[in-house]
Image (tube, helix red, strand yellow):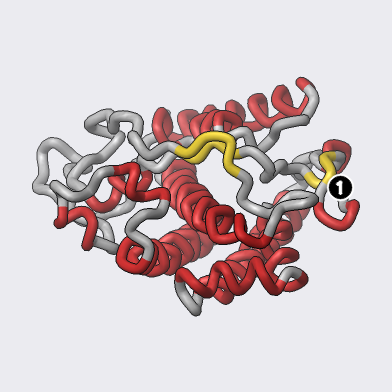
Amino acid sequence: MWSQYADQISSNAGYAAALASIDPALPRYMLDTARDEASHASFLTAYLQLLGQPAGALDAFRTLPGPNGSARLTNLSALTIDTSWFFKYRSNLNPDVTPIPEAPGTLVNRPTIPQAGTPSSDLLTIVEAALLHVSLTEQMEGSTYLALSAKITSAEVLGNLGAIMPVEMMHYTAFQSSVARLLITMPGGPLSLLDLSARPDIARSILPAPAIVDPRLPAVSAVRPRMIPAAGAVALVQAMTRSNIFAGQPPAFFTLMTTTAQAADAAVRACSA
């Protein structure tokens, strides 16, 4: 996914310019994030091998057509983008405690990179959707790292995963400065579907607002959700699947992703027990 975004920024001047029209720093944010995510993938794969564990066998599924004839795992041509992440951090809601209703601004069937024959006039709409998509993925990643780290008993494993998790939230926060610019400079954009006119406190907010993470304690500004049901590996795979990012993959791919995620969540519960 991230390599596709980086390729577009590096090779498509119109795409990069459309991102910069929202926020001049946005192309840099996305390139830096692509670099970081590639480092996470190679680091975690090597760490699994160091521990004598099998790494994820996904190469056989790199068959989806991508830009310039490349083969990809992910499909960015028709995404469903859940925008409830906007409320997870800007309001006092915490999915671990109170279910967050489906956001009215969910985008359906939206490309986040241009397809063959896409006119340049459509690029702004495409990059707006891309900004919302990367915000969603970074919010989910931070929560999943936290959920999987919370019960780890190995100091080394906890140190390695704990060193990555804050970077995911740095990515998310960087993109929120661009989201704030999108709200200010392009009020007719996709976030207008959220109807924020009655909630100026949420519309102006960027950093996490305090929320209840423990009913026995006062509200606190914190990463959420952080519990396995809402933030674990299975929840992440289900959310990514709903987004249509794996459209075109065979059933064997979804079976592998699901069983791997179930094993990860089960390992965390075993540590807890």
Image coordinates of residue 246 in percent, x first then y, are 69, 35
Q: Which is more toward the observer, 83 or 197?
A: 197
Q: Is residue 195 left or right of residue 146?
A: left
View extreme (bottom): residue: 24
Q: Count the marks.
A: 1
Q: Residue at x 33, y 49 (%)?
A: 192
Image coordinates of residue 52 in percent, x first then y, are 77, 46
- Amino acid on which disc 1 is placed: Ala
Image coordinates of residue 137 in percent, x first then y, are 51, 49
Q: Residue at x 48, y 36 (%)?
A: 232
Give the answer, above or below, for where 23 lies relative to 98: below
Give the answer, above or below, for where 97 lies relative to 112: above
Observer able to see residue 95: yes
Image coordinates of residue 35 in percent, x first then y, are 66, 69
Determine which quarter of the picture holds residue 94. Answer: top left
Q: Residue at x 64, y 26 (%)?
A: 258
Q: Is residue 93 left or right of residue 48?
A: left
Q: Which is more toward the observer, 81 or 153?
A: 81
Observer able to see residue 155: no
- Which quarter of the rendered picture does the C terminus lie within? top left
Element assignment for label 1: strand
Q: Which is more toward the observer, 202 or 190?
A: 190
Determine which quarter of the picture holds residue 6. Answer: bottom right
Category of crowding for the residue at label 1, using alpha-carbon neighbours closer than 10 angstroms: few (below 14), some (14–19), many (at least 20): some
Residue pointed to by mark 1: 71
Q: Residue at x 22, y 62 (%)?
A: 204
